[in-house]
Amino acid sequence: MIELQWVNKVFNQDQPNECRALREVNLRLERGGIIVFKGPSGSGKTTLLTLIGCLARPTSGRITLDGRLLSNLPERFLTQARRHTFGFVFQQFNLIRGLTVLDNVLLPAYPLGRSYRDLHQAAQQVLEKFGLLAKATNKVEWLSGGEAQRVALARALINDPAIVIADEPTANLDSTLSREVLALLGELATQGRTVLISSHDPLVFESARVNRLIELRDGQIVGDSCFSKDA
Amino acid sequence: MPVFIEQQKYLIDYTLAALFRRKTRNLGLLLVYTLLVFLFASVLLLSQGLRREAAVLLQDAPEVIVQRLVAGRHDLLPAAWLDTLRQIRGVGEARGRLWGYYYDAAVKANYTVMAAPERKLADDRILIGAALARVRQLGIGDGFSLRAASGPPVLFKVAGVLEFSSELLSADLLLLSETSFRTLFQLPPALYTDAVLAVRNPREAAMIAQKTALALPSSRPILRSEILRTYDTVFDWREGITFLCLGSLLLAFLILAWDKAAGLSAEEKREIGILKAIGWETGDILRMKLWEGLLLSLSAFLAGYLLAWWQLFHGGAKLFSPLLKGWAVLYPDFQLTPTVDITQILILLAVTVLPYIVATLIPSWRAAIADPDAAMRG
């Protein structure tokens, strides 16, 4: 379970361009299913996901994962959490240009020092699952938006994380590709993973696969709806 | 341990890919870097080689040379001094030498002319250094005339060219009989240029020099070790001048390296942020950057050093020899003996590789300690 208590995030604190991205957020997220954070641009969705995923620290407040306090962990332990618990899919994909699809997918596993054979086998499986095996040796800049999104998803899964975080996963895709990506995320949830999505795309937050919809505005939670897990 | 090795293999794999992605930039840097190492290594290897060559040759030089000073200037030495020198305890033999310089206006060069009684040359025969033979296009049996101090030319026949291994010091040498020397320079029979002493116990050379100075107050004894030291100083001085010139080049390179390595582009910063976001530690990033610095700088070092080695020991050392061998018309042509000096290699590594690695690591460390989110935003 992920729990946030009185979480605030302020960028450029005490400077003329200070920005209060999150205000007094209290939230409890159960494991499993798809949880969508909905809200307009600047509502704090991405910031909230980066705090949950240990990509940044809150300015104040506490974040715990299964009772373990994450918000004041040293950098080394935060990395462990990022490496083993979370898998990220960024809005702009954030793939490393100049590298092949396979290399990008392998990257999160490099610091673990897994054997070459195991690692490549795992990468082949995940690429096959997302229909990318034929593109494994292609450079990522040659891919279409949908393909790049699937590569980002494959990369997020290479270390087999329990929680997948997807920031605006359909923002750069047309409706067909959006449905495709949504289906893949749904499949991950079916496997028992927790999928956290930020989106202001109705195609996402109106999807029947969504188990919980949390609405943000101006850095605060303004709505929280739960749906049946069987939906 | 296997995990650590696997990790390093993956990091090197990624580093190589990263280097190839910025091909033009890294290739340019590699070329400039290689050139710098090549220049520094050339100077170091050449000056060290010359010093060693001179030391080897001077091993056979006399332990003590005695000169006569008049009003602080070198003057001719009377033959009677030789008897005085022979009476000094510890002196095995005292022999007078005849040598001087001869300016040849035809090639605008100075020859070192020396009487060589041990060669038993006929009065009309000479032996010449290889550089002299090259410049004057002389071979065995050719005639060669020198103008005597009294005016008329004296004709000699070349009896031989001095052997190759001694060319560093004998390039401009011209050997002839004592009689011919005295005739050529109008030198009276009871005078010598200087005297050389053979010492029974080489460890007593300094003591014998002291005794000589006491027995002959206007003499100046010169020890072999002093000659070696002078050669060392001359080469050190020349090396210093060359390094001074290269210093500006090194500075330019350091600025370039700092600019290229230290100034992380927005794309590189973002890449570090991505790597951290997907589970890389700050340590992993630093190790990757360390590999990057090491791969680039060691490749440049290896290429530059080997290139310098090749041009020096196989390519005739054309680039720096005028600076380090001296400015002359008669350049010695000789082959240096290749040797590996670990200290020298370490010094060269320290001045070329270390600064680059530091310049690579510091900005990467700065980018890597930021939160991944902040690093990705640039």
Image (spheres, coloured by chain):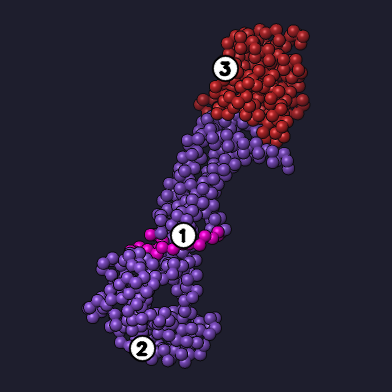
Chain colours: A red, B purple
Residue A178 horizontal/vertical position (percent) = 62, 12
Residue annotated with mark 1: B46
Figure check: A31 above or below B342: above
Query: Which contiguous range is marked in magenta?
Result: B322-341
Residue type for callout 2: Pro
Residue A92 horizontal/vertical position (percent) = 57, 21
Marks 3 and 2: which is nearer the front?
2
The answer to which of marks 1 and 2 sits earlier in the sequence is 1
Marks 3 and 1: which is nearer the front?
1
Q: Which of A163 and B193 is in front in this view?
A: B193
What SS does tag 3 mark?
helix
What SS does tag 2 mark?
strand
Q: Which chain carries label 2?
A: B
Figure check: B230 above or below B301: below
Q: How crowded is mark 1: few (under 14 residues within 10 Å), some or many (20 or more)?
A: many
Residue annotated with mark 2: B78
Residue type for callout 3: Gly
